[in-house]
Image (tube, coloured by chain):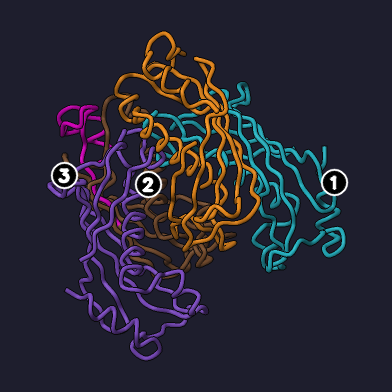
Chain colours: A brown, B purple, C orange, D cyan
Amino acid sequence: MSLYYHKVQYYETDMMQIVHHSNYIRWFEEARTDMLDKIGFPYAKLEEDGILIPVLSAEAEYKKVCKFGETVCIETTVAGYSGVKLRLNYKIWDETRSEVRTVGSSSHCFVDSSFRPISPRRCYASLDEALRGTVE
Amino acid sequence: MSLYYHKVQYYETDMMQIVHHSNYIRWFEEARTDMLDKIGFPYAKLEEDGILIPVLSAEAEYKKVCKFGETVCIETTVAGYSGVKLRLNYKIWDETRSEVRTVGSSSHCFVDSSFRPISPRRCYASLDEALRGTVE
Amino acid sequence: MSLYYHKVQYYETDMMQIVHHSNYIRWFEEARTDMLDKIGFPYAKLEEDGILIPVLSAEAEYKKVCKFGETVCIETTVAGYSGVKLRLNYKIWDETRSEVRTVGSSSHCFVDSSFRPISPRRCYASLDEALRGTVE
Amino acid sequence: MSLYYHKVQYYETDMMQIVHHSNYIRWFEEARTDMLDKIGFPYAKLEEDGILIPVLSAEAEYKKVCKFGETVCIETTVAGYSGVKLRLNYKIWDETRSEVRTVGSSSHCFVDSSFRPISPRRCYASLDEALRGTVE
């Protein structure tokens, strides 16, 4: 489980005076990127090494609104890793983690720079091992 | 069923040289707004009348990438309307509708300007009737 | 002079209940892209041909707010083209062009896919000629 | 002078594989918000108190590109404060502040929640004093 903190920005709000729902999908990406940093595989480095991890699906269920002025905590867990696919779950909390604001998930595959599917298990053993170690 | 066309913008792409996945959630909103225009209830007018339709959940499944230079067609269908909740399905096609790029959905409730739940059935009969007429 | 119409989207608003100022910079890009389409050089095609037109500077002066529910008209004029640099001016009007909302400008150079400066005058004569024809 | 650090996000890049130029305008806002936090007047609190600080103009001059994987440092200075208008300058550096990537500025006025101009000098003395103390 990885925790990532995000300060809500003014440009993330909409005229409903809450965070626009599309931004939660972006925060999931921020948290996912941060998790990869923490396990030693920064995503910028992965792309340099020719491994892209595109998003196959993303979903969010909004329970409570987030507002400008707040800092939120995004909890990321690796729900599954098969060697060719990856599934992450997210919980967006208030800063003190006393209230869940949004839950969501994303699923991913691995491709090379020509968008051909690849398997970390076969072509990037250290990443494969690191991801296996994160599954909860 | 409502069709809405969107020209992909450069600022919607990311360094994977495809449309960033968060933008599909925004395109769903564009298509939803357009559908409300078409049934005679522009969303700006609804908010002026004190009815907000926040997003309870949103999801997208990415099948094929969209690229800058393309125009896409977003097909919106009303999957359900209970009088208090609304569910929409989306299909993002290429311009000629020969290939599905992304499918998704969103669910919504109705609230007043203080975010108290309201029912169009009770307080906005014309909208209620229009929405009933769209369910497929 | 080229006119481009943009329907204001909900996700472009902020909690001040107006369009967030950063989006005007994006609308300038939309209008610029549209102008290139109109003179026969779609920007997606230019990038395929190995010509990128990065932004060197951008500025906007906000005179009146834009709101959700409106359609705005963006007027683009080519203020200068030297063979190696391009300067565009923009006026964002309400739909009927009776009120100016924002004025702005952007300047650009031309580079190849390795970001080395190039001159359309030397390496892309048809584009060079088309751009010369647009200067006002 | 106030320093603010921002980690470049994947969703901020475009297909030129650099940060999209519109995001610098958003980073200026992040840095401005952070500066207001530091002088004891969080912008969320100001809006609650009925003071809005809309943007009158914004400009950016791009010198070097920023890329995903980097952290940038945004230096904000208060270039002028007249009691009714505020002008800020920004420099975006790499993380170690050895290379300037972008310079820019923004100007602002002060309005109440009905968008009527107000003067902090007259109606919010503590903010007025704090802003005077920041001018360089």
Name the amino acid, label 1.
Gly
Closer to viewer: mark 1 or mark 3: 1
Work out whether D60 lies above or below D128: above
Q: Are marks 1 and 2 in contact (CB under 8 Å)?
A: no
Q: Position of residue B57 (x, y in %)?
A: 32, 66
Q: Is residue C48 among what the camera can see?
A: yes
Q: Which residues are magenta?
A: A105-131
Of all chains, the one bearing label 2 is A
Q: Position of residue C135 (x, y in %)?
A: 52, 25
Name the amino acid, label 2.
Glu
Q: Nearer the viewer, residue C13 or B5?
A: B5
Residue A5 part of the magenta-drawn span: no
Image quadrant in which you'd find residue B71: top left
Image quadrant in which you'd find residue B34: bottom left
The residue wearing badge 2 is A29
Instruction: Find the distance from the CA under tag 3 to the CA under tag 2.
Output: 20 Å
The residue wearing badge 1 is D133
Mark 1 surroundings within 10 Å by alpha-carbon count, few (fewer than 14), some (14 through 19), many (20 or more): few
Q: Earlier in the sequence, mark 3 or mark 2?
A: 2
Instruction: Find the distance from the CA under tag 1 to the CA under tag 2.
Output: 39 Å
Q: Residue furthest left?
A: B98
Of all chains, the one bearing label 3 is A
Residue A110 part of the magenta-drawn span: yes
Q: Residue furthest bottom?
A: B122
Residue depicted at 39% across the width and 86% down the height = B124
The residue wearing badge 3 is A82
Q: Residue furthest top?
A: C122
